[in-house]
Image (spheres, rainbow, N blue to C red):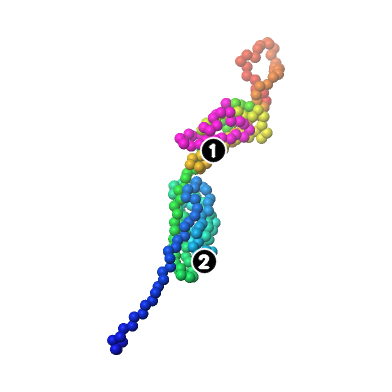
Amino acid sequence: SDLGCTTISTNIVNEPPPWGVPVCGPDSVCQGATVQYCVCDLQGGPSLNLTFQWTVTGGTIVDGCCSECIMVRWNTSGQGTVCVTETRHGGQYDGCIITICKTVILKPVPSPFITGPMIVNAGQSGTVYCTPYYPGHLYSWSVIDGTVTGGQGTNCITVTWNSTCSSCSGQVIAYETQNGCCGTDTLNVTVIPGTGNLNGYVTYKNAYNTGLNGVAVTLK
């Protein structure tokens, strides 16, 4: 002032306490899986006026892009990320924005490939089916219109096909598991009915009464 006096004014500013938005959801998933991720601890409760924006790498958001929870389908293997940006409105946090990211390990799914006969006779036994072997992988099999007679739990099995068939369309299904992720392959097999051992007689024209030794007979 003109008299040399100085006025000092003091304002107290209260800084709001730190806050965060931890993302809850699986840290490790199989490629191709669809799982949920959420903002798992909304500090201040559901009464807060909040907005959310999610981004994902290595996957696709299939539901809930702007809510506190989303569904993600992981498309690749390797590593992915889930990030959420939270904006708070009102109160001491009005206008505050924070972004939190979560790293997710994306485990590959095995891809078995079955090799073996695709056309068999009803009742045929000893038919072998295989898929490539990889150390540490687990294998199991199922068969429709037939029975696994050997090799269950390995990468190769032996199958006996049923002696009778209804649709005569069998299947061999392989399941291959690694680190909790399971892949499958299905081989469709045509089963030819009416084969096997027959008892009876064959009548043929033979003026010289020669034997049938070495002669092939086809029954239709």
Pinpoint residue 209: horizontal percent, then vertical percent.
Answer: 68, 11
Is 190 drawn above or below residue 79 in the view shown? above
Q: Residue 48 carries which label?
A: 2
Q: Is residue 153 magenta?
A: yes
Real-space Cα distance between discs 1 and 2? 48 Å
Q: What element carries label 2?
A: loop
Q: Can residue 130 be seen in this view?
A: no
Image quarter in which the C terminus is found: top right
**Crowd around label 1: few <14 · some 14–19 · many ≥20 (10 Å):** many
Pinpoint residue 22: horizontal percent, then vertical percent.
Answer: 47, 57
Q: How many marks?
A: 2
Q: Does the magenta stretch include residue 192?
A: no
Q: Is mark 1 on a helix, strand or loop?
A: strand
Quarter occupied by residue 205: top right
Is 134 drawn above or below residue 53 in the view shown? above
Q: Which mark is residue 85?
A: none
Q: Which residue lies furthest to the bottom in this view?
A: 2
Q: Which residue is drawn at 53% across and 53% down?
A: 36
Q: Which residue is drawn at 54% across and 66% down?
A: 47
Is 95 drawn above or below residue 135 in the view shown? below
Image quarter in which the N terminus is found: bottom left
Q: Give the residues in magenta.
A: 126-154
The amino acid type, in three-letter code, at marker 1 is Tyr
The amino acid type, in three-letter code, at marker 2 is Leu
**Crowd around label 2: few <14 · some 14–19 · many ≥20 (10 Å):** some
Residue under label 1? 175
Q: Which residue is drawn at 50% across and 64% down?
A: 44
